[in-house]
Image (cartoon, rainbow, N blue to C red):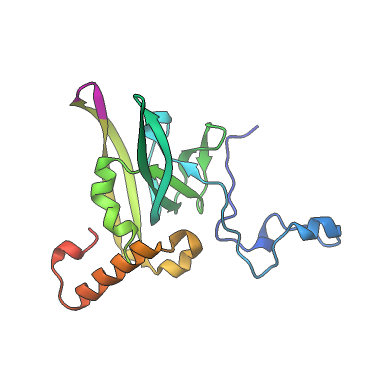
Amino acid sequence: MSNQATTDHGKAASSKGAPPAGASSAALAKSLDDRFTEVGADRFMFNPNKGCTGKLTGYLLNKVEMPEIERAGQKQEWECFLVLTTAPAKGIDREKNVVDVPVGSEVLIPGTFKIEDAFAKAAVSAAGCYEVQIVPLHKVDIGHGQTMWLYKMGYDKKSIKPRAEFGPAAALSAPAAVKALAAATAETAGASSEDIPF
């Protein structure tokens, strides 16, 4: 069995998984019509604590609220950033295996302090989606028995694309959309550099 993951993101239903010509009506009933692009495919997790090595490169589509987790007896809210890969990466699948993640896959990366600081505004920017690269470097001790990952992070200034190009995964939630629209309006009216996503 291979550790190669597969994805249908961004591909028409007829390109993969569509029943062959002459397939039964039951098989046809479970496939999308040719004009639809599949959404909601399984996502992977990029987490250096769990064995994901190398770079995560792709379009920063959004921020995603995750189910609460329990740490030291306390429930804790957390968010991930959603990245559509433009280069192969390592990721964790639903069975918690580290697998090779192909280009065009949706990958979640936990919103650590450093990543949040660098990409929080860009992830929900009305201006569009930025191509980013995140490279885990090493952990540092932050006291009280806790560690934090340090990352090298960057974005490609020339590769911004409209959110609509990425479909529902890049759509902003209503509060984020209103905030992004206000920031975009302020920017066109001569807003300060604090409103720029990076």
The quarter of the displayed image where residue 68 is located: top left
Q: Residue extending furthest top?
A: 145
The quarter of the displayed image where residue 189 is located: bottom left
| Image side of residue 114 versus residue 50, left or right | left
Q: Quadrant of the C terminus?
A: bottom left
User: x and y percent of residue 127 in the render?
Assistant: 32, 69
User: x and y percent of residue 114 in the render?
Assistant: 24, 42
Asked if 141 appears above or below 120 in the picture, the reply is: above
Q: Write the residue at 23% across / 48% down.
A: 117
| Image side of residue 18 versus residue 132, left or right | right
Q: Is residue 121 visible?
A: yes
**Residue 146 on the magenta segment:** yes
Q: Is residue 23 visible?
A: no
User: x and y percent of residue 149 in the render?
Assistant: 28, 34
Q: Write the residue at 49% across / 62% down.
A: 168
Q: Which residues are magenta?
A: 143-147
Q: Write the residue at 30% across / 40% down.
A: 112
Q: Residue extending furthest left?
A: 192
Q: Residue extending furthest front?
A: 74
**Residue 37 on the magenta segment:** no
Q: Nearer the viewer, residue 54 or 25?
A: 25
